[in-house]
Amino acid sequence: MTIELDAPGSSGLLDASSRREISFLSNMYVLGLTLTAGIGGLLFGYDTGVISGALLYIRDDFKAVNDSSVIQETIVSMALVGAIIGAAGGGWINDVYGRKKATLVADVVFIIGSLVMCAAPDPFILILGRLFVGLGVGVASVTAPVYIAEAAPSEIRGGLVATNVLMITGGQFFSYLVNLAFTEVPGTWRWMLGVAAVPAVVQFCLMVFLPESPRWLYMKDKKSEARVVLEKIYDSDRLEEEIDQLAAAAMQDVESRKRSVSYMDVFKSKEMRLAFFAGAGLQAFQQFTGINTVMYYSPTIVQMAGFASNQLALLLSLIVAAMNATGTVVGIVLIDRCGRRRLALFSLSGVLVSLVILSLAFILQSSCNSNNQILSLGFCSSGIGWFAVVGLALYIACFAPGMGPVPWAVNSEIYPEAYRGVCGGMSATVNWISNLIVAQTFLSIVELVGTGGTFMIIAGIAVLALLFVYSFVPETKGLTFEQVERIWKERAWGSEASSSGSSQKLLEYVA
């Protein structure tokens, strides 16, 4: 993909008249940084996908697990608990110690967790391993998008950050392949869970030789080191422009850098409250619009279509994961062309339609099961099942390109440097908490209002998500970090106050 546009200046004061052409493949160094950091996304996706298959064999090995649904739920959800803790602390680690060290820490913790799970002699040690793996995933979910965003040219930043989401969906697909590969191997589930350590080891070894984020280095007054990294990313003309932007940002953040930014500092600043509300809201709606519930009901939907087979259920997992990954590729292509906000709105519109289709399919099937008149018309044959399959396919096709990558891309670029780690960690924590809430309440809601009613509730949430994105999420396509920061100042204090503040900072900088 190639994007051509006027290179924007960070303060609106730099010359941006020259046009530049930048593509994903124009700088293999940046692509290498992106793919290496994206291994964290692979770990994220693999861990969330592999447990579904591994749990089948864990039940066979441990009678306590087979006899207790609570232990089974704990094995699955403990990784989410760890991810919540890891994401919350990961923001602080990113800001204090840097993106590179945060990635290395995440890898070490993930490797320890994988080995503990692989060698677990009982379910409780297995649960401890799941906690460690979750901690690693939580830190990685904060770090990878920020590291990629800070090393990427603004023109292709969204697509490169979305590559991390592609690695997540690719990790899920890989986990299903591993599940199938080890079904006939002794120690099945131990291999499934232990293999996760391999990509973590690979990422650790690669990250040792890669640099720290140039923006983090510059903000920590390591300007010569930052320049060395930037010289590998930009040509000579663009290099000076980027350094000027960093210098201007450093002047604005000088007070923040005198002390560590705390979580409460986010809520003391009006513009930061607005930014965090938009970023965290996107993360919450990503989960509450039903991606995990739709994936959970995929086998049921196929059975409605008249296909009942365990092998087919495993094949479906692969197909759904492949569709999810393919949709993410489409998102990578579109996110820097269409923009984050527009892509999210189109995505949510399609998600809303597909949820209504799924809801109607389940409601009609429920009616068919209790209404002989409808049965006599033949309406309850596989027709309703295929109606549901269309809804499932449409949902994945609409969700994957938009609401899959957009929340992560937006959260990697809407916060000022001093707050990027803390706010990124807080918003990722919101995502994991929302994930846990959905996982723990979905079946209870189904019991109360039925599957069709549950999907209709989720459709209502999709309407709220549409209104939220339209009202609170700005377009950040092609903007520098400093231009995005000015958006929040204008929203908080008005354009005149923002312009006045920028002029004052310029006078201070020139003086």
Image (cartoon, rainbow, N blue to C red):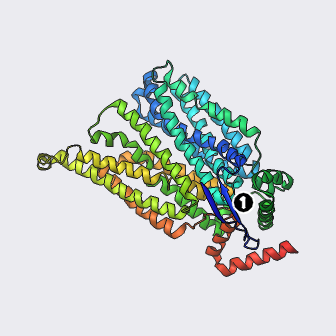
Element carrying mark 1: helix
Residue 422 position, x and y percent, is: 67, 55
- Where 362 sits versus 205, above or below? below
- Where 450 sits versus 479, above or below? above
Quadrant, the N terminus: bottom right
Residue 274 position, x and y percent, is: 60, 67
- Left or right of 45: which side holds 374? left
Instruction: Name the residue: 36% across, 58% down.
Output: 353
- The residue lying toward the viewer, choosing from 87 and 67, is 87
Farthest residue in the top direction?
186
Q: Quadrant of residue 496?
A: bottom right
Residue 261 position, x and y percent, is: 72, 58
Question: Quick one: label 1, few (<14), some, or many (20+) residues within 10 Å?
Answer: many
Q: Report which residue position mark 1 lands on.
A: 417
Q: Is residue 433 visible?
A: no
Q: Is residue 127 visible?
A: yes
Instruction: Name the residue: 55% across, 29% down.
Output: 193
Q: Quadrant of residue 133?
A: top right
Give, as a three-letter code, the residue at label 1: Glu
- The residue lying toward the viewer, choosing from 17 and 459, is 17
- Where 152 sits versus 44, above or below? below
- The residue lying toward the viewer, choosing from 338 and 201, is 338
- Where 511 sits versus 59, above or below? below
| Total numbered circles | 1
